[in-house]
C-alpha cells in the first residue's frame, strides 16, 4: 500500500506572537471583537465589485459612443439614420475597438481613475480600429458599401463621444475613486501601527488572529477576514514571520510580509536563485525595445536638426574666435552611462587660460573667467548645443540626467558624498536636457540641497521613463532656456 508523505507543521506557540487563541469567533480573552474594524473591512470588500462594475460601464459607454458616432455621422452626411454604410462600419469597428482597448487596458479601473491616461488609451484603440477598418475596406475593394464621409465623420464624433463619456464618468465616481481602488488588509501583530494606518489596518490580537496551522479556528478566522481582499499585508516581529508565512500561503489573495530591516537596501523586487531568495536591487538599462525606441527617436530628431544647426554652429564659431583666442569647442570628461566617462562637447565660454577641465570651481554669477560672448551663450543655453554630436555618437541622449564632471561639488562635498544614490542616475544615458532642468533645478550647486532636488527628479525620470515623457520634457525645455540660474 502506498504511503502518502506528510509535512509536519510545527504549531506556532503563542509566545512567538504574544497572543493566545480561544475558540470564540473573532475575539480573544473574552473581549468583544473590534466592530469598528469589521465595518471598515466590510466596506473595503465592496471595492472588487465596484471595480468590475466600473470596467463594464466603461466598455458599455465607449461602445455606445462609437455606435452613436456613426449613427449621427450617417444622419448628417447621408440624411438617414443607421443605414448600411454606418451599420457595416459599426459591425467591424466595435469588435476591433474591443480587441485593441482590452489589449492596452483602456477599461482598467486605473485608466478610469487617471482621466488623461484613460482617454489616451481609449482613443488610441479607436484610431487603431479605424485604421484596421480602412485596410480591410482597401484589400476587399469595398466601394459602394463604404462611405468615406460617414467613416471620417463617424470616427471624429466617436472620439468626442468617448472623451465626453470618460470625463462624465470621472466626475460621477471621482470621490469614490479618490478613497482608494484596492482592498488591502494590513495585519499588525506585536508591532505598532504607523501614524496613518489605512482603512484596512487591524491589530491581530483584537481580531483573534494567530498564525497557527494546527488550529482550524485560527485559519478560518484569517480566511474570513481575507475574503474579498485584493492583498493581505502582515507587519509582525521577526520571530513570528515563519509562522505568518505558512499561514498566508493558505489564502486566495496576494500576500506580503513587511521586512523593515531590508529598507536600507531599497530592493525593487524579490526572486529565487539556485533555491535561495534574492533581492532585485537594480533593473539595469531600459528594456531592449525601449532602448531601440529611444535611440531611434534621438537619431531622428538629431539628424533632422543638423542641416539647420551646422550653419548656426559656423556663425557661433566665428563669433567665438573674434571674441577671444582659443578653440571654438570646449571638451571635458563627464560621467556617463554605467558610471563610465565620456568626452562632452560644448562651445567654449571661458578664456582658454582659465578653463576648468575638472570643474573644481563652480561657475558663479559675473564669473571673471567667462567671456562677453560666453556670458550670452550660457544664459541662452546655446553653449550646450554641440552636445548633439554626443547624441549622434551614442554617448548621450536628447533627454536624460545631465552629465556632471568628476570634480563637481554641492557646497563643499562631492556629489556622491551628498547622497550615495547619485550613482543610480547613470543607468540611462545622460541627456541634453532632463526632468530636473524642466522643473527649474539647474545652475550651480552652491548648497547640498541644490543637488538633492535635481537628483530626486533624475531618479524619478529613470524609474518612470516613457517616450511620451521624453517628448513632454523636450517641449518643456523651451520654456526654461532663459533661466535666472543660467550663468
Image (cartoon, rainbow, N blue to C red):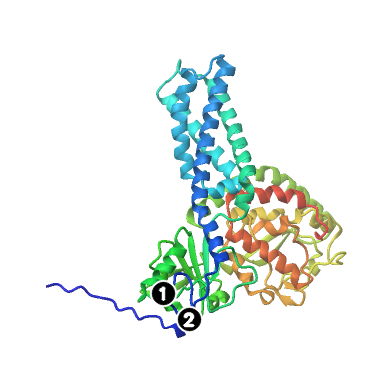
Which element type, helix, strand or loop, lies under badge 2? helix
Q: Which residue is mark 1?
A: 23
Q: Which residue is found at the position 51% from the left and 33% from the top?
A: 63
Name the side, left or right, on which 67 lies relative to 430.
left
Q: Which residue is found at the position 55% from the left and 42% from the top?
A: 121
- Packing grade of label 1 (10 A; few <14, some 14-19, many >=20) is few
Q: How much space separates mark 1 and mark 2, taking CA atoms?
A: 18 Å
The quarter holding residue 464 reads bottom right
The quarter holding residue 9 reads bottom left
The quarter holding residue 144 reads top left
Residue 150 image point, x, y percent: 54, 21
Residue 146, labelled with which disc?
none
Q: Nearer the viewer, mark 1 or mark 2?
A: 1
Regarding residue 341, the answer to whether it shows in the image is: no
How many callouts does the rendering have?
2
Q: Which residue is mark 2?
A: 17
Which element type, helix, strand or loop, lies under badge 1? loop
Regarding residue 452, the answer to whether it shows in the image is: yes
Residue 481 image point, x, y percent: 77, 52
Name the side, left or right, on which 16 lies relative to 478.
left
Amino acid at each position: 500500500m502506498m504511503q502518502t508523505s506528510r509535512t509536519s507543521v510545527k504549531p506556532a506557540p503563542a509566545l512567538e506572537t504574544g497572543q493566545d487563541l480561544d475558540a470564540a469567533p473573532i475575539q480573544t480573552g473574552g473581549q468583544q471583537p473590534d466592530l469598528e474594524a469589521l465595518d471598515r473591512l466590510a466596506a473595503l470588500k465592496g471595492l472588487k465589485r465596484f471595480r468590475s462594475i466600473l470596467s463594464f460601464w466603461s466598455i458599455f459607454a465607449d461602445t455606445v459612443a462609437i455606435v452613436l458616432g456613426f449613427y449621427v455621422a450617417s444622419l448628417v452626411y447621408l440624411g438617414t439614420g443607421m443605414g448600411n454604410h454606418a451599420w457595416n462600419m459599426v459591425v467591424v469597428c466595435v469588435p476591433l475597438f474591443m480587441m485593441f482597448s482590452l489589449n492596452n487596458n483602456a477599461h482598467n479601473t486605473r485608466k478610469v481613475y487617471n482621466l488623461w491616461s484613460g482617454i489616451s488609451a481609449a482613443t488610441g484603440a479607436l484610431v487603431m480600429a479605424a485604421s484596421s477598418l480602412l485596410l480591410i475596406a482597401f484589400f476587399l475593394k469595398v466601394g459602394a458599401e463604404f462611405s468615406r464621409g460617414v467613416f471620417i465623420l463617424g470616427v471624429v464624433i466617436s472620439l468626442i463621444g468617448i472623451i465626453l463619456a470618460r470625463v462624465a464618468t470621472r466626475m460621477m465616481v471621482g470621490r469614490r475613486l479618490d478613497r482608494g481602488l484596492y482592498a488591502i488588509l494590513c495585519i499588525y501583530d506585536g508591532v505598532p501601527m504607523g501614524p496613518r494606518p489605512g482603512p484596512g489596518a487591524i491589530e491581530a490580537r483584537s481580531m483573534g488572529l494567530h498564525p497557527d496551522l494546527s488550529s482550524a479556528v485560527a485559519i478560518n478566522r484569517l480566511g474570513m477576514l481575507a475574503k474579498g481582499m485584493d492583498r493581505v499585508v502582515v507587519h509582525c516581529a521577526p520571530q513570528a514571520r515563519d509562522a505568518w508565512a505558512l499561514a498566508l500561503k493558505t489564502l486566495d489573495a496576494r500576500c506580503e510580509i513587511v521586512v523593515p530591516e531590508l529598507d536600507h537596501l531599497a530592493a525593487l523586487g524579490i526572486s529565487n536563485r539556485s533555491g535561495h531568495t534574492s533581492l532585485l536591487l537594480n533593473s539595469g538599462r531600459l528594456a531592449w525595445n525601449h532602448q531601440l525606441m529611444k535611440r531611434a527617436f534621438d537619431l531622428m530628431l538629431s539628424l533632422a536638426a543638423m542641416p539647420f544647426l551646422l550653419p548656426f554652429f559656423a556663425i557661433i564659431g566665428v563669433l567665438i574666435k573674434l571674441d577671444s583666442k582659443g578653440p571654438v569647442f570646449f571638451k571635458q570628461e563627464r560621467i556617463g552611462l554605467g558610471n563610465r566617462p565620456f568626452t562632452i562637447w560644448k562651445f567654449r565660454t571661458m578664456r582658454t587660460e582659465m578653463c576648468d577641465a575638472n570643474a573644481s570651481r563652480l561657475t558663479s554669477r559675473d564669473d571673471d573667467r567667462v567671456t562677453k560672448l560666453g556670458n550670452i551663450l550660457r544664459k541662452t543655453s546655446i553653449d550646450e548645443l554641440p552636445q548633439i554630436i554626443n547624441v549622434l555618437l551614442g554617448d548621450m541622449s536628447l533627454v536624460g540626467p545631465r552629465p556632471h564632471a568628476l570634480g563637481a561639488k554641492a557646497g563643499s562635498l562631492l556629489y556622491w558624498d551628498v547622497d550615495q544614490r547619485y550613482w543610480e542616475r547613470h543607468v540611462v544615458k545622460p541627456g541634453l536636457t532632463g526632468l530636473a532642468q524642466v522643473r527649474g533645478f539647474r545652475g550651480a550647486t552652491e548648497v547640498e540641497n541644490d543637488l538633492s532636488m535635481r537628483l530626486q527628479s533624475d531618479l524619478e525620470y529613470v524609474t518612470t521613463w516613457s517616450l511620451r515623457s521624453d517628448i513632454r520634457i523636450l517641449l518643456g525645455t523651451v520654456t526654461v532656456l532663459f533661466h535666472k540660474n543660467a550663468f
